[in-house]
Image (cartoon, rainbow, N blue to C red):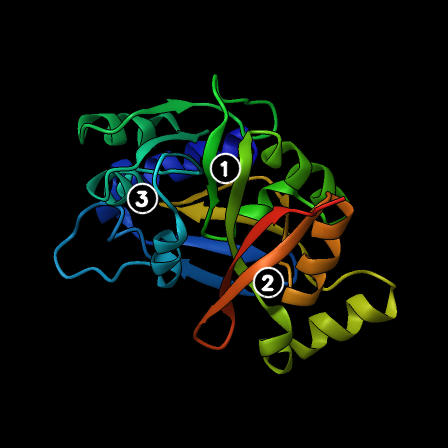
Amino acid sequence: MNAESTDIFSNALTHPDTGPLLIERSDGHTSTTDLGWWLHQYEARPPGDLAALDWAGPGTAEDIGCCTGRHLAYLAARGINAHGIDTCEAAIIRARQAGNRADVADAHTYTPPQPVNSVIALGGGPGIAGTLAAVPDFLRHLASWLTPGGQLIVSSVDWTATADQHRTWVDQATSEGRYPGDVRLRLRHDGQTGDWFDWVWLDPDTLEKTAEKAGLHVAQVRRFGPAWYAATLRRSTP
């Protein structure tokens, strides 16, 4: 996300009663982001890909886009030494207030002080790369944080599973030679509208192909409903 989008996200976290956080695609399709679980609201449903954290083994973990630190608390409860980063200062403040280790940082430029056993990028984390073309370098950068035998734990949306619901978008992208998972988004909240930013949703086959370009392979895949899925990526053997 760009700086303006981060400010809007921050406002949504600090003033959740002033309206929902909306994510608008460049063709006008709009979805609502539920921040209730991240804000510890009673009976709020956790994100579907939360169970992917069970793949994190003992040792250390780095959570990118850690938001208010709920992943970190989940990992800490299992004895994993976890640290998180996020570009949203308001989210990091909440994470620290809850007793988690977290810092404001950008995953594109950050490197942990020591290699970790697991790098976690849930909530569509590979989308931070921005475009399909940028994904291999981004995954390669995240993999450079790993100890030997370490793993990336990522999730994304399999846009092919819901292509019929977005047929106009998919057909137009395909006719123009564009990958349909490459999207332009902006955030809206409480009368504010952010600038457009690039994001990418990776179907499982494309994730596997881009991982190979980064010297990685898909080791495990688990689906959460029709579209969301998670995967573990490990370094490929020479």
As measured in the structure, the alpha-carbon distance from the residue carrying label 2 to the one carrying label 1 is 17 Å
Q: Which mark is residue 28?
A: 2
As measured in the structure, the alpha-carbon distance from the residue carrying label 2 to the one carrying label 3 is 31 Å
At label 1, the amino acid type is: Ser
Q: Can residue 152 be seen in this view?
A: yes
Residue highlighted by disc 1: 5
Q: Can residue 33 be seen in this view?
A: no
Q: Where is residue 183 in the image (x, y as percent from the top left)?
A: 66, 55
N-term mark: 2 or 3: 2
Residue at point 50% right, 25% down? 115
Quarter-wise, where is residue 60 in the image? top left
Dividing the image into 4 quarters, which one contains the C terminus? top right
Please tell me how crowded label 2 is: few (under 14), some (14-19), or many (20+) other residues with Cα within 10 Å.
few
Q: Which residue lies furthest to the front in this view?
A: 238
Callout 3 secondary element: helix
At label 3, the amino acid type is: His
Of tags 2 and 1, which is closer to the observer?
1
Of tags 2 and 3, which is closer to the observer?
3
The reply to whether discs 1 and 3 touch (Cβ–Cβ < 8 Å) is no
Which sits in the foreground, 109 or 20?
A: 109
At label 2, the amino acid type is: Gly
Q: Where is residue 164 in the image (x, y as percent from the top left)?
A: 63, 83
Residue highlighted by disc 3: 71
Q: Position of residue 101 (x, y in %)?
A: 29, 25
